[in-house]
Amino acid sequence: MNDSDPISPARPRCVALMNQKGGVGKTTTTVNLAAAIAQAGFRTLVIDLDPQAHATLGLGLDSAEGRSIYDLMHDPAGAVSAARDIATNLSALASHTDLAATETELASAEDRLERLKAVIGAFSGKVDFVLIDCPPSLGLLTLNALNAADEVLIPMQAHFLALQGVGKLLETVKLLASGPQALNPNLRVAGVVLCMHDAGSTHTREVVADLDAFFESGRTNDVPWKDAKVFRPAIRRNIKLAESPSFGKTIFDYAPQASGAEDYRALADAYLADRRLAAETREDPPLVVTRAASIGEPVADSTGASA
């Protein structure tokens, strides 16, 4: 099986959620999409790679307790035991404010861009999906995420200036994925998730149409976003989504009947459907729902045998 293919019991699918602009729904999407994928039956690991630790807080974790991703970036030994269980099929590696120092502490290390990949490697055979909440900047931490990731998912608001920012972000991904010195030649862009969405706005509709047209124009080109899309449905503006992090809960635990829960569940369905289609198109093993279990237990394959 090709290493970049959707999923196998031996290797998790790694998704970097990034946007160089803050406040666009990146962390909210990381936490709640991960929770929805976990509810669909896939072992899912959230890695909070942002020193602000918002995903950590949003999952109800204390950065001061246990080993954080900061510790693991310096020494990946024991990474699996550092993951904290959140819910059935959902675990997380917490962030810490000390993570900000990693940019300078690892600047001279020869393997500075391989550190996160080593951490994720410890979870082979133990999780199906890894979702990385990247910092809103293109520094050492984000480069580690892009080096480890199979694909990039871009949460954004449908505003004109955000559209310009996405264009620059895509060009950055292209630089990292192309050419003889490419950092990660297999890196692809899965698409855009529209957050805090107001479908009734003319401006919003125009921006979405521009995004659709842009991705469609890349279908015949050898670019990392040739298969990318604007995921539907969009994530509607919902006060419960804004409130849930302050209670340390995902939207499914805080307000399971809210529109935010409905939207993220639908987003997970759309994302997983794309992964299944990709597997079928490349004639790879199908995307298989694993039984619910803790992160350290062996993954059951499609025959029910442990990997």
Image (spheres, rainbow, N blue to C red):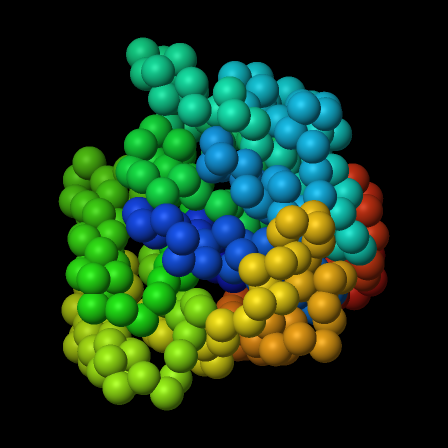
- Looking at the image, residue 233 sits to the left or right of residue 174; the answer is right
Instruction: Name the residue nearer the viewer: 227 or 194.
Output: 194
Q: Is residue 307 above or below residue 220?
A: above
- Looking at the image, residue 51 sits to the left or right of residue 61; the answer is left
Task: Kindly identify the residue that appears in the image at 45 percent across and 76 percent down.
Answer: 234
Q: Position of residue 259 (x, y in %)?
A: 61, 77
Task: Kindly identify the residue that appears in the image at 54 percent across and 36 percent down.
Answer: 53
Query: In the rendered image, which quarter is residue 141 located in?
Result: top left
Q: Is residue 116 above or below residue 281?
A: above
Task: Kindly identify the residue that appears in the image at 20 percent across and 74 percent down.
Answer: 214
Q: Is residue 189 above or below residue 247?
A: below
Instruction: Name the residue nearer the viewer: 26 or 42.
Output: 26
Q: How many marks?
A: 0
Task: Kindly identify the residue that appears in the image at 71 percent across and 50 percent down.
Answer: 247
Instruction: Name the residue nearer the viewer: 264 or 249.
Output: 249
Query: In the rendered image, which quarter is residue 268 located in?
Result: bottom right
Q: Position of residue 68 (x, y in %)?
A: 62, 27
Q: Position of residue 285 (x, y in %)?
A: 59, 66
Instruction: Name the residue nearer the viewer: 4 or 173.
Output: 173
Q: Position of residue 107 (x, y in %)?
A: 32, 16
Query: In the rendered image, which quarter is residue 113 located in?
Result: top left
* Residue 246 visible in the current orientation: yes
* Residue 127 visible in the current orientation: no
